[in-house]
Image (spheres, rainbow, N blue to C red):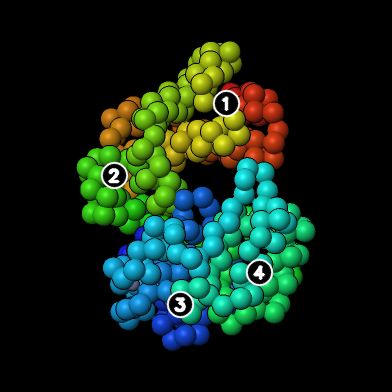
C-alpha cells in the first residue's frame, strides 16, 4: 500500500503522507466517506508509513518486518476495533485504554484504528475522549466513519477531519485493469456501478449475482416507461427489495439507466455513458420517453430512495413512485 497509489483523493493522501514524513502528523484523524471509498486503506497506509523501518519519501517500503506485520494485521502496536454488529461497546475501548497509555512494544508508535466509529455508544465515545484529551505522544488514533453526524462534537473538535470524495469512474477502471488484472469490459462495468468507491467496484466483481441484478434493474427501468400495470411492475422488483441496503443499491442502478437516457437526450458523447455495452438498448428506450419524463422519473426515483433511506415501507415507497410517474 502506498499513498501515491490511492484511487481518487490523491490530495488528501498526499497531505497525510507529508505530515507523517515531516513528523508533524496529528494525534487523531477522523476519516469519513461512503462504504468502499478507501477509509481503511488510508488508515492502514498511514499506520504502515509511521511504523515502517525504511520509509522512502514518506511512503512505506512494504517489505520490512513492520510493514509486513501491518499488512498481515498482526503488528503488536496496531489495534483495530470495529462493531460486533450493532455498536462499539464501552468495554472494547476500556480493553485497549491501558495499552494506549503505555509504551509501544515494538517501535515508536501505537496506532488505534476505530472502524465504524459512529456506532460507538455514548459511553464508549466518552471513554475514548480521555485518550484524545491527554494523549500519550506515541499514540495515533484513526476514526473511520460513514456518519460523521453521530460522533460527539467533543471528539470532532479533537480530531482532524479527512473527508474522502468519490473517485472518477475512469480512475477506478484503470485501477481494476492495471492493479487487479480485471479484463477491460468487466472493469468498465464495475467502475460504472461503483458510485466512485473503488472498494465497492472490487466487491461487485466478486458478487456473482451482480450481473443478473443489473439486468433486472434495466428491465425495471424500462418497465417504468412502459404501459404495464402496477402489480406487473412490482413483480419485476420482488427479488431485489429484500432489505434496505439492497433496495437502495437496486434503485441506484435504475437511476444510472435514466441518467444515461438523459445524457443521450442532451447530446452527450458516448464516453459519458455508464451502460456502454447497452448503447442500442438505450437508443431504443430513448425513443420512447421524452426529456420531461426522464427528469420526472429521476426525481421520483430520488424521492423513493430518500423515503427508503428514512425507513419508510419499501413496497409503499415504490408503489407511490410508480403511480406518480404514471401520473
Ligand atoms: Zn517498511
**Could you tell me how far apart the alpha carbons at marks 3 and 1 are, in whole angstroms?**
48 Å
- Asked if disc 2 is less than 8 Å from ligand 1, the answer is no
x%, y% of residue 4?
33, 69
Q: Give the residue at mark 3.
A: 107
Query: Counting residues from the N terminus, which is met first, the one under dot 2 or under dot 1?
Result: 2
User: Considering only vertical position in the picture, is 252 above or below 272?
Assistant: above
**Could you tell me how far apart the alpha carbons at marks 4 and 2 are, in whole angstroms?**
46 Å
User: Considering only vertical position in the picture, is 51 above or below 188?
Assistant: below
User: Considering only vertical position in the picture, is 281 above or below 134?
Assistant: above
Residue name at image x 46 percent, y 36 percent: 253
Query: Counting residues from the N terminus, which is met first, the one under dot 4 or under dot 1?
Result: 4
Q: Nearer the viewer, residue 292 or 34?
A: 34
- Mark 4 lies on a secondary structure that is helix
Dividing the picture into quadrants, the one containing residue 7 is: bottom left
**Quadrant for the C terminus in the image:** top right
Q: Give the residue at mark 2.
A: 187
- Mark 1 lies on a secondary structure that is loop
Q: Give the residue at mark 4.
A: 98
Amino acid at each position: 500500500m502506498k499513498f501515491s497509489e490511492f484511487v481518487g483523493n490523491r490530495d488528501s493522501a498526499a497531505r497525510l503522507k507529508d505530515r507523517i514524513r515531516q513528523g508533524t502528523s496529528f494525534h487523531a484523524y477522523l476519516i469519513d466517506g461512503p462504504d468502499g471509498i478507501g477509509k481503511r486503506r488510508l488508515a492502514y497506509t498511514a499506520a504502515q508509513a509511521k511504523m515502517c523501518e525504511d520509509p522512502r519519501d514518506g511512503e512505506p517500503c512494504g517489505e520490512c518486518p513492520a510493514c509486513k506485520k501491518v499488512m498481515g494485521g498482526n503488528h503488536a502496536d496496531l489495534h483495530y476495533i470495529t462493531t460486533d454488529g450493532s455498536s462499539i461497546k464501552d468495554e472494547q475501548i476500556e480493553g485497549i485504554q491501558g495499552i494506549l497509555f503505555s509504551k509501544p512494544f515494538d517501535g515508536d508508535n501505537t496506532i488505534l484504528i476505530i472502524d465504524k466509529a459512529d456506532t460507538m455508544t455514548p459511553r464508549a465515545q466518552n471513554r475514548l475522549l480521555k485518550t484524545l484529551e491527554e494523549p500519550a505522544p506515541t499514540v495515533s488514533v484513526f476514526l473511520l466513519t460513514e456518519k460523521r453526524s453521530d460522533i460527539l462534537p467533543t471528539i470532532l473538535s479533537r480530531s482532524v477531519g479527512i473527508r474522502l470524495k468519490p473517485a472518477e469512474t475512469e480512475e477506478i477502471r484503470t485501477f481494476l485493469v492495471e492493479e487487479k488484472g480485471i479484463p477491460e469490459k468487466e472493469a468498465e462495468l464495475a467502475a460504472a456501478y461503483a458510485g466512485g468507491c473503488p472498494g465497492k467496484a472490487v466487491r461487485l466483481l466478486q458478487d456473482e449475482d451482480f450481473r443478473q441484478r443489473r439486468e433486472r434493474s434495466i428491465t425495471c427501468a424500462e418497465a417504468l416507461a412502459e404501459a404495464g400495470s402496477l402489480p406487473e411492475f412490482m413483480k419485476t422488483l420482488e427479488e431485489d427489495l429484500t432489505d434496505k441496503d439492497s433496495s437502495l443499491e437496486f434503485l441506484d442502478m435504475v437511476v444510472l439507466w435514466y441518467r444515461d437516457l438523459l445524457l443521450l437526450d442532451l447530446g452527450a458523447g458516448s464516453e459519458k455513458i455508464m451502460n456502454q455495452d447497452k448503447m442500442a438498448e438505450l437508443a431504443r428506450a430513448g425513443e420512447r420517453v421524452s426529456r420531461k419524463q426522464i427528469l420526472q422519473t429521476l426525481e421520483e426515483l430520488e424521492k423513493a430512495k430518500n423515503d427508503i433511506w428514512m425507513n419508510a415501507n419499501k413496497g409503499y415507497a415504490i408503489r407511490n413512485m410508480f403511480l406518480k410517474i404514471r401520473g
